[in-house]
Amino acid sequence: MEVIHTPHELMERIAKLDKEHSVCQVFIPGKGQVTIVFQANDVDAVASEVQADPQLGELIHSSRNAYQRGDVMTTSELLKSLSSKDFAQ
């Protein structure tokens, strides 16, 4: 798991996400483990990826449940919640 030390590193990691590499987990000191999911807008593409990878389907289901419970944070909310203290070594 990649350790992220600055907001710039976080944005670089997010920028690397694409359809083939759509999920990553990072650790932010002061915040903990963060799971980032790239969500494609193409429903057919997502359905075919889920069919090819059942674990992806489980992850999506888990993410939707977390969203419904309010246990998630948008990227904007995450970035706003970070301060330089969170990246202290």
Image (tube, rainbow, N blue to C red):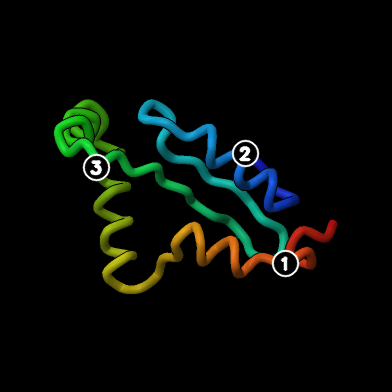
Residue type highlighted by circle 1: Ser
Q: Residue at left 27%, top 69%?
A: 68
Mark 3: secondary structure = helix
Does the residue at mark 1 contact the one at mark 3 (Cβ under 8 Å)? no
**Other-residue count near label 3 (Cα within 10 Å), few / some / many at <14 / 14–19 / ≥20:** some
Give the residue displayed 32% in from the left and 65% down from the top.
Answer: 67
User: 76 above or below 7?
Assistant: below
Element type where label 1 sits in the image:
loop
Disc 1, disc 2: CB below 8 Å?
no
Q: CA–CA distance between discs 1 and 3?
A: 33 Å
Residue 89, position as x, y percentages in the image: 85, 56
Q: Which residue is mark 3?
A: 57
Residue 19 lies, in percent from the top left, at 36, 30
Determine which of the numbered discs, if any, sits on residue 42 in the image: none
Q: Nearer the viewer, residue 1 or 83?
A: 83
Residue in front for this viewpoint, 52 or 86: 86
Describe residue 81's horizontal placement relative to residue 86 as left or right. left
Horizontal arrangement in the rendering, residue 61 relative to residue 24 (left or right):
left
Give the farthest residue toward the right. Answer: 89
Name the side, left or right, on which 29 lies relative to 81: right
Residue beneath the point at 32% across and 56% down:
63
Q: State which tag comes first along the sequence, 3 or 2.
A: 2
Q: Nearer the viewer, mark 1 or mark 3?
A: 1
Identified by mark 2, the residue type is Glu
Q: CA distance from mark 1 to mark 2?
A: 17 Å
Q: Amino acid under label 3?
A: Gly
Is label 2 in a helix, a strand or a loop? helix
Which label is found at residue 83?
A: 1
Check the picture and name the quadrant holding the N terminus. Answer: top right
Residue 27: where, in percent of width, then height?
63, 51
Give the residue displayed 68% in from the left and 52% down from the top: 7
- Residue identified by numbered label 2: 12
